[in-house]
Image (spheres, rainbow, N blue to C red):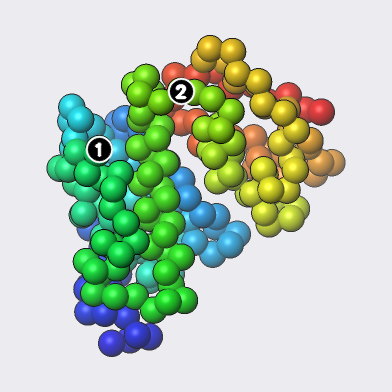
Amino acid sequence: MKAGYSKKVMELFLNPKNVGAMEDADVTAIAGSVACGDMIKLYIKMDGDKIGKITFESYGCAASIATSSMITEMVKGKSIDYASKISLQDELKELGGLPKVKYHCAILAIKALRMAIEKWNVMNGKRKLDEDFVRTLLGAILDPYTGKNIMAAGVVKGIEIDGKKIKIDVKLSDNKEFNEEIASGIEEVFEKMDVEVKINAV
């Protein structure tokens, strides 16, 4: 197989399933970063407590596309509880294996899925909207200056939560385009959530 990829991985790379944005999605989630080479965005339409429809957008290599496609196939029509328990080993087994240097792609797919589930749980009162959750969401956003996420880079200086209102203190740079990129990223990770997010420059 090419580059050590299994037959299944190559099939999903050449003919990926469940590709594309979903405008009427109930919840979305992002993992990874274009700047780092791989980024996955999941879109989920719920059917009661089951994942009725799920699609993805992937920016990256063949493994990124294949693992994203596989994770959508594995959870489509399944319950949230079932989807939350899928492990890296489960995904690798379904893929027929993956070169170790590409494990991070499978991990990103699972990370995006779990983030979508966490968001859904918050949106439905099954998980508290707290600082830990907000920090996790913000960890998916890249700081263009350092290449790290904005939490690790120290861009976020404070988080205040008052009901459905979230104030995020952000240390902005003198680069307008970078600042706009960060602001756009913050808006995107809270997409579909019924919250009011205010970005406060400090």
Q: Is residue 111 left or right of residue 55?
A: right
Q: Residue at x 15, y 42 (%)?
A: 77
Q: Residue at x 34, y 61 (%)?
A: 88
Q: Residue at x 29, y 75 (%)?
A: 97
Residue 121 x/y as whole percent:
36, 28
Q: Identify the residue at the far left of this view.
A: 77
Residue 107 x/y as whole percent:
42, 59
Q: Which mark is residue 80?
A: 1
Q: Amino acid at mark 1?
A: Ile
Q: Amino acid at mark 2?
A: Lys
**Quadrant into which the N terminus falls:** bottom left
Q: Is residue 40 above or below residue 13?
A: above
Asked if one can make out residue 12 in the rendered structure from this viewpoint, the answer is: yes
Q: Residues within 10 Å of mark 1 (few under 14, many from 20)?
A: many
Query: Which picture quadrant has residue 95?
Result: bottom left
Answer with mark 2 or mark 1, whichever residue precedes in sequence: 1
Residue 103 x/y as whole percent:
42, 69
Label 2: which residue?
128
Q: Is residue 78 left or right of residue 178?
A: left
